[in-house]
Image (tube, grey):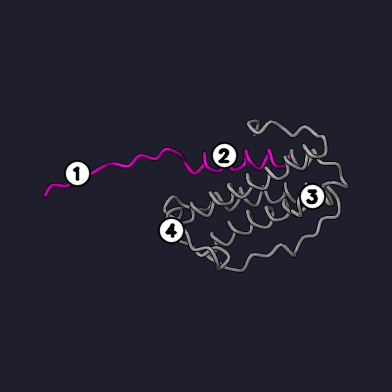
């Protein structure tokens, strides 16, 4: 029996992955900005949460999750620590968490991306899969935001304009 060794080639660097994620975050920030203040916190469709609550979920995942990964801390998920009252509060926290993401993401070595980690003590997957989930979850919730904006008669930002 013969075996063939295959070389693996990296198709994306960790810097490119972060840039991709931050592109989505830039677009989600613009969706937050597009909402009128009152509707950001109150408007919903079909019993879904208002977009401010969806954005709060995203804020509560990205930075805290990366910090947990870097520090190997499996502390439970919690979005109770921050309760924005205005769009400006939400955007300020969004920007702060962007810097937290940049800070901790840069501390994850290439080897750690392949390492299994029990995120928030609940989600045991390789680090790269957790990070891809963060992006997928954001895209999902941003889609809800697009639906809300359209229901309000507001044209959302073009989804391909992420920077």
Residue for point 47% across, 59% down = 125
Report the residue marked by disc 1. Answer: 4
N-terminal of the two: label 2 or label 3?
2
Residue for point 74% across, 40% down = 31
Which residues, given as a range, are shown in magenta?
1-29
Q: Nearer the viewer, mark 1 or mark 4?
A: 1
Q: Within 10 Å of the Cα at label 1, are there few (<14), some (14-19), or many (20+) other Cα atoms?
A: few
Cα–Cα span, label 4 and label 3: 38 Å
Report the residue marked by disc 4. Answer: 115
N-terminal of the two: label 4 or label 2?
2
N-terminal of the two: label 1 or label 3?
1
Secondary structure state at the residue bearing disc 3: loop
Q: Within 10 Å of the Cα at label 4, are there few (<14), some (14-19), or many (20+) other Cα atoms?
A: few
- Residue 44: mark: 3
Residue for point 82% across, 55% down = 84
Q: Nearer the viewer, mark 1 or mark 3?
A: 3
Report the residue marked by disc 2. Answer: 20
N-terminal of the two: label 4 or label 3?
3
Residue 69, position in %: x, y?
54, 60
Compared across the picture, whether 64 is left or right of 119 comes to right
Check residue 127 for magenta coloring: no
Residue 127, position in %: x, y?
49, 55
Compared across the picture, whether 57 is left or right of 10 comes to right
Residue 83, position in %: x, y?
80, 59
Residue 39, position in %: x, y?
85, 46
């Amino acid at each position: 029996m013969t075996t063939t060794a295959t070389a693996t080639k990296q198709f994306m660097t960790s810097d490119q992955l972060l840039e991709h994620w931050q592109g989505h975050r830039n677009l989600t920030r613009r969706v937050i900005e597009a909402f009128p203040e009152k509707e950001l916190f109150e408007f919903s469709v079909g019993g879904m949460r208002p977009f401010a609550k969806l954005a709060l979920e995203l804020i509560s995942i990205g930075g805290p999750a990366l910090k947990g990964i870097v520090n190997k801390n499996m502390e439970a998920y919690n979005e109770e620590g921050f309760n924005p009252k205005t769009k400006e509060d939400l955007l300020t926290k969004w920007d702060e968490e962007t810097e937290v993401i940049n800070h901790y993401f840069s501390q994850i070595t290439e080897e750690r991306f392949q390492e299994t980690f029990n995120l928030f003590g609940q989600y045991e997957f390789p680090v790269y899969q957790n990070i891809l989930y963060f992006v997928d979850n954001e895209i999902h919730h941003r889609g809800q935001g697009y639906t809300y904006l359209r229901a309000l008669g507001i044209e959302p930002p073009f989804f391909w304009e992420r920077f």
